[in-house]
Image (spheres, rainbow, N blue to C red):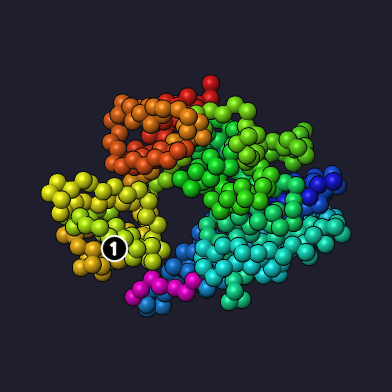
């Protein structure tokens, strides 16, 4: 007997038929004698709809600013998961399985106070463990917990993955299965590159890079938790026949295992290509070149919770003025420009310029640590397709390249084949 946490994403619970299919996956594990907790997302498209309602309400009521209260945002957007937790519990009960739904506050899943992007601080698994021991399936609403202010807090988009891994850690599950609409983690998004290959295993570190550089198959925080708490996490498909051969395999279920580097026997130099669209670039022109200028720029941006990514500073020609360019998510451009203008005196620059519609394409692989020339290959491949590079950043295990967004898919396909990742 094992203890398994099964998480189902939005497309997996998109309608009542899909929910029936989810219940069949759960039934298979229950009938095999396992203790099961289920974590569910909202039906696909639901969270987007709820978010847009929240965003549109202030203006529809005469406000000039799009401001809304983050606590009320959480109250609204967490409701999608409440619906599916109840529906999945009912589906299971209809199939003769003892099941009960749980909202974040009922467990409780305690978070910090960052409404809209809260972090899980603590989960009390006692009651869930007790119920599972009595043969009851816990169906838990993902994406939500309760903050120190005693109010519902959501975990940021894609947060149900994090709920699942955190619950798996707190109940000491043997496995956490993330069921989604693809049958594992691929070398790049299989919807963009049909030649992408499914990986049997991928290391925590590489998955962390892929997720943070744009592969939305797992939320970044879920990978961090899986790595820290050593949760055996599989990404697998809910769309396969729940009773197909091998689906109930305890040690080697179909899908991709996220695991320690040591568990991977044949390590490639490059394992995957990630990309993020909707990047924007901000440039400060004729910036005074003196100690403390970076702190003067990035301090206020950090305080405004703006995520700055690639930073490029030119060498000053005359020792007094320079240019500084950096990227921010497209949605933060206006806010960032306002922060910079507000601090113009302190920073000391002439003009601030911005460009939207950029994309960041990244090449990831642990094998890069011990191989030279990995980046040069990317530059050559992109040059052959006449794709202009606007900025580059590298780390031990990744290279990120900023390009015009119109070329993002061509760049991903080009790099994918340049590094020999296409399936034969
Ligand atoms: P869910 O609703 O189940 O949480 P998501 O849409 O959040 O599903 O994540 C699954 C999607 O992630 C896939 O449909 C796929 O398009 C995308 N994706 C991006 N990069 C990858 C990758 N490297 N491997 C697999 N899927 C990826
Ligand atoms: N429903 C939430 C979202 O769309 C959480 C999730 O699906 O993981 O972001
Ligand atoms: Mg997701």
Magenta stretch mostly in which secondary structure?
Answer: loop
Residue at image coords 37%, 55%: 308
Q: Secondary structure at mark 1?
A: helix
Q: Nearer the viewer, residue 5 or 137?
A: 5
Residue at image coords 48%, 48%: 212
Q: Nearer the viewer, residue 32 or 80?
A: 32
Q: Position of residue 291 (x, y in %)?
A: 25, 58
Residue at image coords 33%, 27%: 380
User: Can you identify the residue that label 1 sits on?
Assistant: 296
Q: Position of residue 400 (x, y in %)?
A: 39, 40
Q: Position of residue 208 (x, y in %)?
A: 53, 45
Q: Position of residue 81 (x, y in %)?
A: 63, 61
| Region in magenta | 64-70
Asked if the stretch drawn in magenta spans residue 66, the answer is yes
**Image vertical order of residue 366 relative to residue 180, above or below:** above
Task: State whether residue 356 appears in this view.
Answer: no
Asked if the stretch drawn in magenta spans residue 418, the answer is no
Residue furthest toward the front? 291
Residue furthest toward the bottom? 62
Q: Is mark 1 within 8 Å of ligand 2?
A: no
Task: State whether residue 420 appears in this view.
Answer: yes
């Amino acid at each position: 007997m094992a203890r398994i946490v099964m998480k189902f994403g939005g497309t997996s619970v998109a309608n009542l038929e899909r929910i029936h299919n989810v219940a069949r996956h759960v039934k298979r594990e229950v009938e095999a004698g396992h203790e099961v907790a289920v974590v569910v997302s909202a039906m696909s498209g639901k969270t987007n709809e709820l978010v847009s309602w929240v965003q549109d309400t202030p203006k529809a009521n005469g406000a000039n600013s799009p401001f809304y209260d983050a606590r009320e945002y959480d109250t609204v957007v967490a409701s999608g998961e409440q619906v599916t937790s109840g529906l999945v519990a009912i589906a299971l009960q209809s199939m003769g399985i003892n099941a009960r739904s749980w909202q974040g506050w009922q467990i409780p899943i305690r978070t910090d106070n960052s409404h809209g992007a809260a972090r899980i601080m603590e989960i009390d698994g006692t009651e869930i463990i007790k119920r599972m021991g009595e043969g009851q399936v816990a169906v838990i609403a993902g994406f939500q917990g309760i903050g120190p202010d005693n109010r519902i807090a959501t975990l940021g988009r894609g947060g149900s993955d994090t709920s699942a891994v955190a619950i798996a850690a707190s109940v000491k599950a043997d496995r956490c299965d993330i069921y989604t609409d693809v049958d594992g983690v691929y070398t790049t998004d299989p919807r963009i590159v049909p030649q992408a290959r499914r990986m049997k295993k991928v290391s925590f570190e590489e998955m962390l890079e892929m997720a943070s550089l744009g592969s939305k198959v797992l939320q970044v925080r879920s990978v961090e938790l899986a790595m820290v708490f050593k949760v055996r996490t599989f990404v697998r498909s809910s769309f396969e026949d729940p009773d197909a051969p091998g689906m109930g395999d305890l040690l080697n279920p179909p899908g991709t295992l996220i695991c320690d580097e040591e568990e991977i026997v044949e390590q490639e130099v490059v394992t995957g290509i990630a990309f993020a669209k909707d990047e924007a670039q901000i440039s400060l022109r004729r910036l005074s070149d003196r100690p403390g200028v970076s702190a003067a720029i990035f301090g206020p941006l950090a305080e405004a919770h703006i995520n700055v990514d690639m930073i490029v500073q030119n060498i000053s020609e005359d020792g007094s003025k320079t240019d500084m360019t950096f990227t921010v998510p497209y949605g933060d451009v206006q806010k960032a420009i306002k922060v910079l203008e507000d601090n113009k005196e302190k920073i000391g620059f002439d003009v601030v310029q911005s460009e939207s519609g950029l994309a960041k394409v990244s090449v990831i692989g642990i094998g890069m640590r011990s191989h030279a020339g990995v980046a040069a290959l990317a530059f050559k491949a992109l040059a052959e397709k006449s794709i202009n590079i606007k900025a580059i950043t590298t780390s031990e295990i990744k290279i990120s390249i900023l390009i015009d967004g119109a070329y993002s898919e061509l760049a991903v396909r080009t790099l994918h084949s340049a590094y020999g990742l296409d399936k034969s």
